[in-house]
Amino acid sequence: MFQVGDRVRTSAAAVPHHTRLPAYARGCAGTVVGVEGRWPLADARAQGAVVVQPVYTVRFSASELFGAGSHSVTLSMWEEYLT
Amino acid sequence: MTHSSSPLAARVRHVEALLESRGLVDPVELDRALEAFLARASPANGARIVARAWVSDEFRARLLDDAGAALADVGLSMGGGLQVQRLCVVENTPAVHNVVVCTLCSCYPIALLGPSPTWYKSPAYRAQVVRDPRGVLESFGFSPDGEIAVWDANAETRYMVLPMRPGGTEGWDEERLAGLVTRNGLIGVAPV
């Protein structure tokens, strides 16, 4: 479980199945800014399984995601996507 | 390419036909549910929410804290589609301007904003707005002050922007204020 303010890193691996972790946000460090409750993991649901996990709102700097830019990008991350 | 002529749309129609032929889906029921949902889906809903937030600090605070619950105040809900969706409203300030995208597909709060514009679903917008939001906003003729915060609706949350109330609108009632709010403003590619 993570809490607001925690520094987290997204999974770097490309997966051979449906996922809602966009490629541009793989292997990046961000900060948890919110907790969205528990939702069925999209990756499992696409394979016919129900796996419910906490989802976190995670903010990334553009420089972390793209190596340039002064804006932020905020995404939702199932717990499995984070370390 | 239009939505209805795309290869994906053809696949969806094919799957729908298979489901109907095997009796798994009732086409009349499906059409009825879609029509009922779309008849209520309009940017006028988002505009009413914004106008209420502009006149009531108490509503605005609850909207930003738990948008789904606050919607009941204006007779709306996020439960009109196939499943209840989590709504998050993000507030523009002089320091931060918000803009919404779904980089993976086209997720969007249809009930509050009406059907999404074609450009919102385009690969160009989805790829560029996370990398160069200021450049994308300039292509809409809009150069906001302050920092830019991009929200990617990549999972279960749908986002709506709460624009800043324009100056010179003191004393306006909610209905008149709502008339100022545009769909593009609710996505974040216009000031209001």
Image: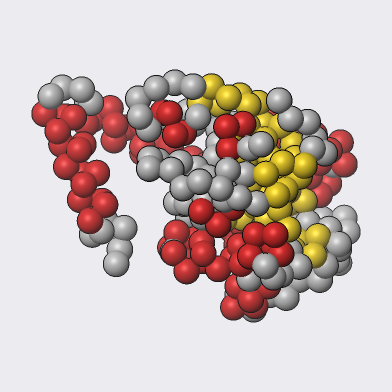
Q: Position of residue B143 (x, y in %)?
A: 73, 75
Which quadrant: the N terminus of chain B? bottom left
- Residue name at image x 36 percent, y 37 percent: B34
- In this image, A52 relative to A15: left or right? right
Q: Quadrant of residue B112?
A: top right
- Residue name at image x 58 percent, y 43 percent: A11
In depth, the one of A29 and B95 nearer the eye is A29
Q: Position of residue B3 (x, y in %)?
A: 31, 58
Q: Position of residue B111 (x, y in %)?
A: 52, 41
Q: Is residue B143 above or below residue B150?
A: below
Q: Quadrant of residue B30?
A: top left
Identify the residue at the far front of this view.
Answer: A13
In depth, the one of B21 and A66 nearer the eye is A66
Q: Is residue A12 above or below residue A72?
A: above
Q: Quadrant of residue B29?
A: top left
- Residue name at image x 23 percent, y 26 percent: B25
Which quadrant: the C terminus of chain B? bottom right
- In this image, B35 relative to B59: left or right? left
- Residue name at image x 81 percent, y 49 percent: B54
Q: Is residue A1 above or below residue B136?
A: above
Q: Position of residue A7 (x, y in %)?
A: 77, 42
In depth, the one of B158 and B163 nearer the eye is B158
Is residue B79 something one can see in this rendering?
no
- In this image, B26 relative to B187: left or right? left
In depth, the one of B29 and B139 nearer the eye is B139
Question: How many discs appear?
Answer: 0
Q: Is residue B107 above or below residue A3?
A: below
Is residue B9 something one can see in this rendering?
yes
Coloration mode: secondary structure
